[in-house]
Image (cartoon, coloured by chain):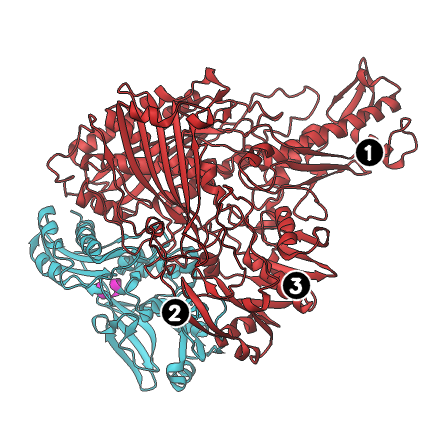
Chain colours: A red, B cyan
Amino acid sequence: MTAIDERRDTAADGPAPEIGKSRKRKEDAHLITGRTTWTDNMVLPGMVHLAILRSPMAHARITAIDVSAALSRPGVLAAYTGRDFADTQGSIPCAWPVTPDMVNPGHPSLAVDQVNHVGEAVAVVVARDKTAAQDALEAIDIDYEQLPVVLDMERALAPDADLVHGHTESNRSFTWIFESGAAGTGAPIEEVLGQAEVTLSRRFLQQRLIPAFMEPRSTVVQPDGEGFVMWSATQVPHILRTMLALTLSVPEHKVRVIAPDVGGGFGGKLQVTPEEVITALVARKLGKPAKYTESRSESLMSAHHGRDQIQDITITARRDGTVTGLDVHLYADMGAYLRLVSPGVPVLGAFMFNSIYKFDAYRFVCEGVFTTKTPTDAYRGAGRPEATFAIERIMDELAVELGMDRMELRRKNWIRHEEFPFTTVAGLTYDSGNYEAATDRALELFGWDDLVAEQADRRARRDPVQLGLGISTFTEMCGLAPSRVLGSLSYAAGGWENATIRMLATGKVEVVTGTSPHGQGHETAWSQIVADQLGVPFEDVEVIHGDTQSSPRGLDSYGSRSLVVGGIAIVNAAQKVVAKARRLAAHLLEASEDDLDFANGSFTVKGAPGNSKSMAELAFAVFSAHDLPEGMEPSLDADATFDPENFSFPHGTHLCALEVDTETGFSTIRRYVCVDDIGEVINPLIVEGQVHGGLAQGIAQALYEEAVYDDEGNLTTGSFVDYLLPSAADLPNFITDRTVSRSTTNPLGVKGVGEAGTIASTPAVVNAVVDALRPWGITDVQMPCTPERVWRAIAQGAEKSERDPGGTVSWGGASTSSSDGSGADDTFADGSGAGSTDSSEGSQR
Amino acid sequence: MIPAAFDYLKPSSLSEAVQAYAAAGEDAKLLAGGQSLLPILRLRLAYPELVVDLGGLAELTGVSDDGDAILIGAMTTHADIASDPLIKQHAPLIAQATETVADRQVRHRGTFGGSLAHADPAGDLPAVALALEAELRVHGPRGERSIAARDFFLDYLTTSMQPGEILTAIRVPKLGEGWSTHYEKLNRVAQAWSIVAVAAAVHRSNGTITEARIGLTNMGSTPLRATASEQALAGAPATEESVASASASAAEGTSPPSDLSAKADYRAHLATVLTRRAVRHAAGI
């Protein structure tokens, strides 16, 4: 179910506002029916096709490479190795040097002397068609001299560790530290740790994930004089243009980047990819348009991955449950190279571990580590899901330790609604929120008390199917980002967004946005905003995006920023248009500007209702320009650039009831309730879609997805047979609702929703799994909580499941330690577990 | 990815298909529904010189009554199988297992015969064919012959079909009075392969299980029968306790694989749990 806002007053004589309407997305018909141009559909005259040979080795020197046999294959025009581009390819840029001494080893697009992960590009074949290029890859001869693989982050940091990059001193890229005492945002952490009444430490593992966007990456490059035009399946055409200009030393004004319709990204297309650079290099070298489209296998092993952290977290509290200190240490796997924002991803989490709770002191230390694996970078939530997971998991553990109700512990420590705006121990100021309201609504929808009773009954009966209840009361920082904050974090770019509104002669409206939708529905939502602002019909608004020539200024779409930053730029531009129109209307109506009312797209003289000018009339008056106010230029068009003062802070309460078949270990989500507070909503239907997709992705981290490397550094989850994405068949009907606490930092009162579901849902699900298994004394199950892991956890009891030696992380099981505490009380003390007979509900799907 | 180049032939008669396939020898592959072959070709795990497409052979599709058995054309799609009235009536185990195969798209392309001939022990239908004691009819250069399901699956992706032989039909004995069946499957997501699955056919007379046939999916390099459990169930009282006790030996004699989805010991455990559940469901206990 979805709450529909009924609160708005509609003007008695005008149409209902567009904002708040569940409009179906205007872009969907052409996207769904394929009547559109994906990058791979592009065909240019004389276009050549690329195929890329990728390293089968995780870590090796290239001692010999010979492409001559490939050149003699039918249809082949050229073949290149990294050596051919060694002087021109530059380095894939890293725009986020998080510390002054961060080590960036450089990232060739095409490996020159050495490969550092499986799937790294080592040679490229150019042919008249894609098939010929693909076939000729087999003729390339390469000798590799194997180097020791580096897979384990903790071992990689040992003094005698094998190095990923021989020219660096260690596998450490950076150590980034925040400490509340030093920052002046709270007490010194050591002081608080030293005085703690209760101290609880846990190690949580964030498995490596693959963004797995629907449309594989594809790039077409047309050389054009000194420069080139690039079409690419990217979510960041503007950033890509600037970075390509810098990387390839081509003047920026000679580079045009176009993101046509793009089929998903989830952060995975927030990148300057080696494949984009290679396609540009080849096209420019041959003077011919060139296309490269990856296969799904290539995508899984070479497009950047996400997450992959070891989280050591310590929480301290008074015995009454008041939390006092939070001490976080992360190892963050960068993979083999630094890509666009790789180091910044864990650092974005630095401000979110304290979440909605009031701590006296906080420390965050993150070590970025190189390994011989695919580089990591942004993936839906980027840093914040990791933080939310750790805090929400350890709050549950603390509640068990203290013998407190889990929700009561949260209530006792969260920021009360009357305390906003509230500056946290991490130094962020949360503008608004009401955790009580969202939680109360969620508990009501969930039927908490009944489920608690059912859980108790199943435990008492030792039912083979146990019930677990999971909580996640989360917040996130969205709307990336205030430029001054990005500057303070050493990010190279700003966080503003741009919009232009053009009034056409017939009263139709073009909105040019710097956001770059790749599935979000901006064309619909932006039209709704503009329709209300200008009083024009929704259908009369066209949204233009994704081409650096037609939409020259922008910082693109990621980090739940498009509405919160780009939407506000549109509002500001619209207000400038209205101001210009008001001046013209006053002139034509022979009235003072102050005497005009503007409603429903018309200016009316106060007290003379028949005397009016519509936006369409004014647009035509400007087009003809026969009678304008003295000195007014013949244009109503306006441009605005908006730089937010603050992040926005959506929050919500997610509750998960999950059945664990203790005989098989199989988990089934029985009920999932989320009440999100994302401020005001432009289009409830789009929001619902974002929440559903986000939940699916977050639940997938909890239960299904994991990129696994074997001990030779091969990605063993190299297809969707092994990298498991859930479908609708695997997920419950979500029960969703919203509360509305307006953001106070932007005129629409909006907060962003692109990442909420993903950030919130993972800990809700894992908390539910662990809750179901508490009677066995189990305190953690490693993600994804596969049936086998759950079964082994039960079989082995509290003393933890063994880490699969071939897994992503070969550093052994999670270690835990805790001080005294009352602990759980209803354990299956005989260790025998639940009974072994079936109940009628006992079978899995 | 793009498959390596191959020649393609779509015969319009079975004899033409047999002739072409036999003539090409080991360099040829048969294309049924393509749900296993095409991924293999696209990943370049196989390089056939000739692909013989059986899609034009209408005589290989459909289900017919054959006296004490039903006869299923090898090229009948999963979707057609799952909704076929003869199968629902006489071999509901096939319908039930087929409905769990992958996803709707795959079921509309994939075929019953293709799944058996591919002989992937993780596939759902080989164990079902084994439990139902089906007979597989093959046509080859030397004519037609029948192979019992127990003799058909030799090893991982390997059957007892000779070079040049094509699976044309599957004869499934009708289960008579007193028989009932159930397919019990554990997979991680709906479209994933089975980690383990169990196909059970149980004959019950009064309070006794007179006979049980239990096929195991993904418990070895071929589909297997849970022989020890079958023996323990024969003549056992139809009670929870005796089923549980008999199911405890379901993994006896198997050699389950260890892979990303599960290690062998977990599979062995699952075999006992799923056998117990499948037999209980089938026997209505």
Q: Residue visible at 69% across and 32% down?
A: A531
Do marks 3 and 1 share a chain?
yes
Residue A106 percent coordinates (x, y): 52, 55
Label 1 sits on a secondary structure element that is helix
Up/down of B145 relative to A93, above or below: below
Which numbered mark, 3 or 2, is in the foreground of this view? 3
Using the numbered discs, state the Cα–Cα distance from disc 2 to disc 1 in whole angstroms.
Answer: 66 Å
Label 2 sits on a secondary structure element that is loop
Describe residue A818's horizontal placement relative to residue A671 as left or right. Answer: left
Residue B44 percent coordinates (x, y): 43, 71
Q: Estimate how packed mark 1 is, as few (under 14), some (14 to 19) or many (20 or more) residues with alpha carbons within 10 Å.
A: many
Do marks 3 and 2 share a chain?
no
Q: Residue visible at 9% across and 47% down?
A: B241
Q: Name the residue under label 2.
A: B75
Q: Estimate how packed mark 2 is, as few (under 14), some (14 to 19) or many (20 or more) residues with alpha carbons within 10 Å.
A: many
Which is nearer the N-term, disc 3 or disc 1? 3
The magenta segment is B127-132
Up/down of A482 relative to A69, above or below: above
Q: Is the magenta stretch mostly helix, strand or loop?
A: helix
